[in-house]
Amino acid sequence: MEQNMVNLTINNIPVTVPAGTTILEAARDAGIKIPSLCFLKGVNEIGACRICVVEVKGARSLVASCVYPVSEGMEVQTNSAKVRKSRKLTLELILSNHRMECLTCARNAHCELRELAAEFGLDAVRYANDELLPQIEDSALHLVRDNSKCILCRRCTAACRKLQEVGVIGANDRGFATHIGCAFDRDLSEVDCVSCGQCIVACPTGALYEKDDTQKVWDALHDPTKHVVVGPAPSVRVTLGECFQNPIGTNVEGKMVTALRRLGFDKVFDVDTGADFTIMEEGTEFLHRLQNGGTLPMITSCSPGWVRYCEQHHPDMLPNLSTCKSPQQMFGSLVKTYYAEKAGIDPKDIVVVSIMPCTAKKYEVAREEQRLKNGCLPVDVSLTTRELGRMIRDAGILFDKLPDGEFDQMLGVSTGASVIFGTTGGVMEAALRTVVEKLTGADSAPVEFHDVRGLAGIKEATYDLPGRTVKVAVASGLANAKKVLDMVKSGEKSYDFIEFMACPGGCVNGGGQPQQPAEVRNFTDLVALRAAALYEQDQGMAHRKSHENPVLQQIYADYLGEPGGHKAHEVLHCTYVPQKRYRTDG
Amino acid sequence: MPNCKTVIPYHGTPQQEEELKKVIEAHKGQAGATMPVLQAAQEIFGYLPEEVQIMIAEGLDIPLSEVYGVASFYAQFSLNPKGEYRISLCLGTACYVKGAGDILNELETKLGIKAGGITPDGKFSLDACRCIGACGLAPVMTINDHVYGRLTPNQIGPILAEYQ
C-alpha cells in the first residue's frame, strides 16, 4: 500500500515523511531533537507545556510540535531566536512554581526538568519562589506525592485514565490553585487506586515516587538476630541493569545475584521458583474447573494491581479469579513454612525481602488474607527494582565489575516458564506448557505458544485439546482488561482462561521499574526490548516447563503433597474479597 | 483545598435522586455530557455534594476525579449548600480597591470558614461574587436580600450578630 508522503523542510533540511507525522517525529528523522516535557507518546498528547514549540512559516504563533502534523511545503525552524527565547521563558515560568531541592530530591539526577534546565543552559532562575513548602501526601502504602514539585504536565493523570481507565487522579480547581489530586482531595488511600505505579513511571519530576522501604531492609541486614532472605521477580533481571546505564534489555541475572549476596542477604533465592509453583497450582485449578464444571473463564491472580481492580470494579467476577497467591506471596509462603522447617529457623526470625517491578506489591504484602497459619505474613518488605538499584549504589558496589553469581539452591531453581512471567502473555504460555502436556499426556506437547506472545493489548488463541477446545485471552493494561471483561459479560466473547496484567506490557513495564525519560520512551519500545531478553533466557534454560523443576518436584514430594491438595491450599492459596470503591464518610 | 468536602450531611430525597437519574439517562453516552448533567444536578440539589457526584460518575461511567475536576474548575458550581443566611461579598474592581479583601478576611475569621464554604450549623454560607452594580456603596455585601455598603472590618462582627 502506498502511503501518502509529505515533503517539508525543517531547519532548511528537506524531509519526506508519511502524512499525519508530527513535526517532532519528522524532525527526529532529520536528526533534530526538539525538547519536550508533557508529551508522552500514546499516553499524553495534549501540547500543553509549550516546551516543544517551533516556528512554522505563515503560522500565527509558535506551534506545539508534539501534536502538530506536518503538511506539504511546510517550512519549520526548530532553533530560531524566537523559539529559543520562548522555550527558555516557558521553562523559567515552570520552575517558578517548582520547589527546587534537587540535591535531596528522590528524582535527583534523573529528573527530566533538571535535564531540560541543563540543556537550555539556564544559569539562573529569575522567578524563583523560595516560599514553596513540601506538600507531601503519603497515605498510600506504595507512593508519595509532593505537589510542590508537580509541573501539571498531566502525564500521571493520562496514565491513570487512558492506560488504566482507573482515573483516581485528576486536575482539581483552577488557575494558580490547580493541582493534581483525587476527587474531593481525598487521600490516595481512601480512593480506588490500584497501586500500579504507572503514574510514577510517567512523572518527569520528583513529584511522584515509590515509598522508599530500603531503610527497613538495611535495618534487617544489620540485625544479627534476623535471617534475611531475598528473591527477585522474573522481570527484574532484565531491567536492573538500566539503573547502571546498561542498554535496555540487558539480562544481568548473574550480577544481580552477586550484588544481593554482597549486600549481605543470608540467602539469595528466586521468585521465579515461586512462579513455577503458581503454574502448578493455577494449572491444576484450571484443569479442575475445566473437568468439573467450575466457574469459567478462570482469571489469573498474579498481578496485585489487577486483583485490586477486580475487587473494586468487578466484584461479580471474583468467583472467576484464581485462588492462587501471586508468585511473590507463594515464594514468601514457602520461605516461612518449608524453608524455615528445613533450615530449622523460627519463621518469626526470618525477614523475607522481595525485589519487584511493581509498586502494588508493597500493598500486596500487607494484605491480611495472605497471612500464614503460623501467624506470619509471607513477605516483610517489597522493594522496587529502583530501590534495589539505589541500595547497590549506596553500598558502594560497582555493579558492572561484578562476577556472575548463582542463586542458592533450595528456592533458587527455576524454569523458562517462570522467567517469561515477566511479560504479557508469559503466565498464559507458562500455564499452557504444563496444562497442554497434562491433557495430551505427551512429552511432545509444544513448548512455545506464540499466539499469546507479542505487544498487542489484547490477544486471544484457541487450542484443540483432547476432549475439548480451550479458548484463552491475554490482556495487559487495565483499560484492555476492562474491554475484555465487558465483552465477556455481554456474551460477545467467551473464554476458558484469561491472563490479566495491570501494567501495559506486563511486569517488564511495571510501575516499579527504572524510570526511562519520555525522550527514550517516545522513540523506543521499552516493553519489546525488555521482553525479548526474557524470551532469550527462556530458550537457554535446561527446563522450560514448570512441572519439570526438580526443586519444585521435591518440595511437593517432601512437604506440600499433591498440587491443589490440602497442604498446598493452606500455604499457597487465599480468598479475594469485594472492596469499596468510594468513601463518603468524613 | 478547604471546602472540597462539605460539612453539611447529605439530605437528598429519593425524588431528587430519581430526577437526577433521568437527566443522566438522557445524556449517557454523549460527548461532553458532564457539564449539562452537573448543571442539572445543581438545579436539583442546589449544590454538588460527594454523594451526587458519585451518582453522576457511576451513571455516566466516568471517573469521579473527572466529575470533580469539572465541578471544582467552574465558579458556577458549588460544592456546599447555601446557608440560611447567604452572604455574598463583592470582590469586583471598585469594591476590591476600597478594601473588600480586608472585609473578606474578617468574614472568614469571624465565621471560621473560607469563601465558598458554609458554617457547620448551616446558618451562614459565604461567597465572593463579582460586581453587583452598587459600586457607589463599595465595599458592599449582601446577606440574603439585604445590602450592606461602605463596609469597614469592624462593622462585620455587629452585622453578623444581628443574625445569630
Image: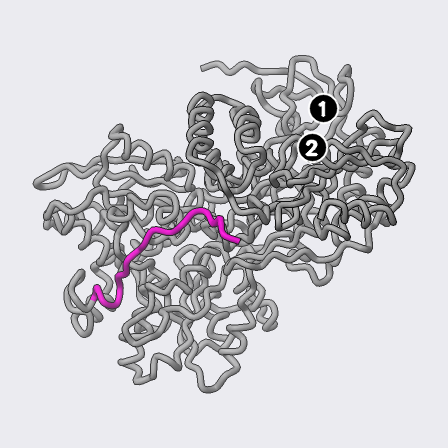
Q: How is the image coloured?
A: one colour
Give yes or no for residue A571 being in the magenta stretch: yes
Protein chain holding label 2? A
Q: In which quarter of the image is residue A540?
A: bottom left
Identify the magenta region.
A568-586
Q: Image point 46% across, 74% down: which residue?
A: A261
Q: In this view, does A92 lie above or below A221?
A: above
Provide the residue designation for mark 1: A10
Magenta stretch, overall SS: loop
Q: Please check whether the numbered discs 2 and 1 fall on a single chain.
A: yes
The image position of residue A270, as x and y in percent, is 37, 66
The image position of residue A257, as x and y in percent, is 44, 68
Q: In which quarter of the image is residue A562?
A: bottom left
Q: Quadrant of residue A144?
A: bottom right
Mark 1 or mark 2, which is nearer the start of the sequence? 1
The one of A440 and A93 positioned closer to us in this rendering: A93
* Kind of element beneath mark 1: strand
Q: In this view, does B113 lie above or below A269?
A: above
Type of the residue with mark 1: Ile
Provide the residue designation for mark 2: A32
- Is residue A542 among the parts visible in the rendering? no
Looking at the image, residue A196 sits to the left or right of residue A26; the answer is: left
- Is residue A30 among the parts visible in the rendering? yes
The answer to whether marks 2 and 1 mark residues whose Cβ atoms lie closer than 8 Å is: yes
The one of A384 and B18 positioned closer to us in this rendering: B18
